[in-house]
Amino acid sequence: MSLALTNRTIDKYFGFLTNLDISSKKKLIVKLTESIEPVKDSSFDLRSLYGAWEDSRDSDEIIKEIRASRIEKKNLADF
Protein backbone atom coordinates (compact mmCIF):
# COMPACT_ATOMS: atom_id res chain seq x y z
CA MET A 1 0.00 0.00 0.00
CA SER A 2 1.32 3.43 -0.94
CA LEU A 3 0.56 6.87 0.36
CA ALA A 4 0.41 9.71 -2.17
CA LEU A 5 1.13 13.19 -0.83
CA THR A 6 0.07 16.51 -2.26
CA ASN A 7 2.67 19.17 -3.03
CA ARG A 8 1.46 21.16 -0.04
CA THR A 9 2.04 18.23 2.32
CA ILE A 10 5.46 17.57 0.81
CA ASP A 11 6.37 21.25 1.34
CA LYS A 12 5.38 20.95 5.00
CA TYR A 13 7.59 17.88 5.45
CA PHE A 14 10.43 19.62 3.64
CA GLY A 15 10.11 22.63 5.93
CA PHE A 16 10.55 20.37 8.93
CA LEU A 17 13.41 18.41 7.38
CA THR A 18 15.46 21.51 6.48
CA ASN A 19 16.20 21.94 10.19
CA LEU A 20 17.93 18.56 10.43
CA ASP A 21 21.71 18.32 10.63
CA ILE A 22 23.66 17.16 7.58
CA SER A 23 24.26 13.64 8.94
CA SER A 24 20.55 13.09 9.54
CA LYS A 25 19.70 14.42 6.08
CA LYS A 26 22.18 12.00 4.49
CA LYS A 27 20.73 9.06 6.43
CA LEU A 28 17.24 10.08 5.32
CA ILE A 29 18.37 10.32 1.69
CA VAL A 30 19.85 6.81 1.89
CA LYS A 31 16.64 5.38 3.44
CA LEU A 32 14.44 7.07 0.84
CA THR A 33 16.69 5.90 -2.00
CA GLU A 34 16.63 2.32 -0.71
CA SER A 35 12.85 2.47 -0.44
CA ILE A 36 12.40 3.26 -4.15
CA GLU A 37 14.80 0.64 -5.48
CA PRO A 38 13.04 -2.49 -6.75
CA VAL A 39 12.74 -5.25 -4.19
CA LYS A 40 14.46 -8.48 -5.17
CA ASP A 41 12.21 -11.50 -5.44
CA SER A 42 12.74 -13.45 -2.24
CA SER A 43 10.36 -16.27 -3.02
CA PHE A 44 11.39 -19.70 -1.85
CA ASP A 45 11.42 -22.64 -4.21
CA LEU A 46 9.98 -25.69 -2.45
CA ARG A 47 11.56 -27.94 -5.05
CA SER A 48 14.92 -27.27 -3.42
CA LEU A 49 13.77 -29.27 -0.38
CA TYR A 50 13.16 -32.61 -2.02
CA GLY A 51 15.61 -35.21 -3.21
CA ALA A 52 16.81 -38.72 -2.67
CA TRP A 53 17.73 -39.86 0.83
CA GLU A 54 21.47 -40.29 1.01
CA ASP A 55 22.78 -42.69 3.61
CA SER A 56 25.42 -45.41 3.67
CA ARG A 57 23.23 -47.64 5.87
CA ASP A 58 20.72 -50.06 4.42
CA SER A 59 17.01 -49.76 5.20
CA ASP A 60 17.08 -52.45 7.92
CA GLU A 61 19.78 -50.58 9.85
CA ILE A 62 17.85 -47.30 9.61
CA ILE A 63 14.63 -48.92 10.82
CA LYS A 64 16.46 -50.60 13.71
CA GLU A 65 17.95 -47.24 14.76
CA ILE A 66 14.56 -45.51 14.62
CA ARG A 67 12.93 -48.20 16.73
CA ALA A 68 15.79 -48.14 19.25
CA SER A 69 15.48 -44.36 19.68
CA ARG A 70 11.77 -44.52 20.61
CA ILE A 71 10.76 -43.78 24.20
CA GLU A 72 7.90 -45.61 25.84
CA LYS A 73 5.25 -43.30 27.23
CA LYS A 74 4.70 -45.33 30.40
CA ASN A 75 8.30 -44.62 31.44
CA LEU A 76 7.71 -40.87 31.21
CA ALA A 77 5.01 -40.93 33.93
CA ASP A 78 7.57 -42.14 36.48
CA PHE A 79 9.82 -39.23 35.66
Image (cartoon, rainbow, N blue to C red):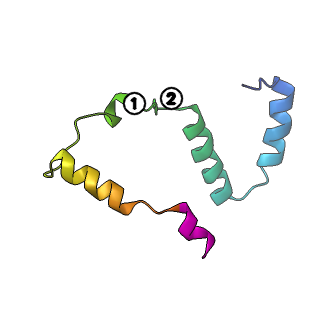
Q: To which residue does mark 1 refer?
A: 46
Indicate the position of residue 76 as horizontal and vertical percent values: 57, 69
Query: 36 left or right of 41?
Result: right
Q: Does dot 1 land on a helix, a strand or a loop?
A: helix
The CA distance from mark 1 to mark 2 is 24 Å
In the image, farthest residue toward the bottom = 79
Indicate the position of residue 9 as horizontal and vertical percent values: 85, 30
The numbered disc on residue 16 is none
Local crowd at mark 2 within 10 Å, few (<14), some, or many (≥20)? few
Q: Is residue 40 magenta?
A: no
What residue is at 57 percent from the left and 46 percent from the top? 30
Amino acid at circle 2: Pro
What residue is at 58 percent from the left and 32 percent from the top? 36
Amino acid at circle 1: Leu
In this view of the protein, which residue sits in the foreground, 55 or 1? 55
What residue is at 15 percent from the left and 48 percent from the top? 58
Q: To which residue does mark 2 refer?
A: 38
Which residues make up the magenta segment? 73-78
Return the disc, 1 or 2, that comes first in the chain's sequence.
2
Indicate the position of residue 65 as horizontal and vertical percent values: 28, 58
Quadrant of the image containing the N terminus: top right
Q: Are marks 1 and 2 in contact (CB under 8 Å)?
A: no
Picture quadrant of residue 33: top right
Query: 57 left or right of 30?
Result: left
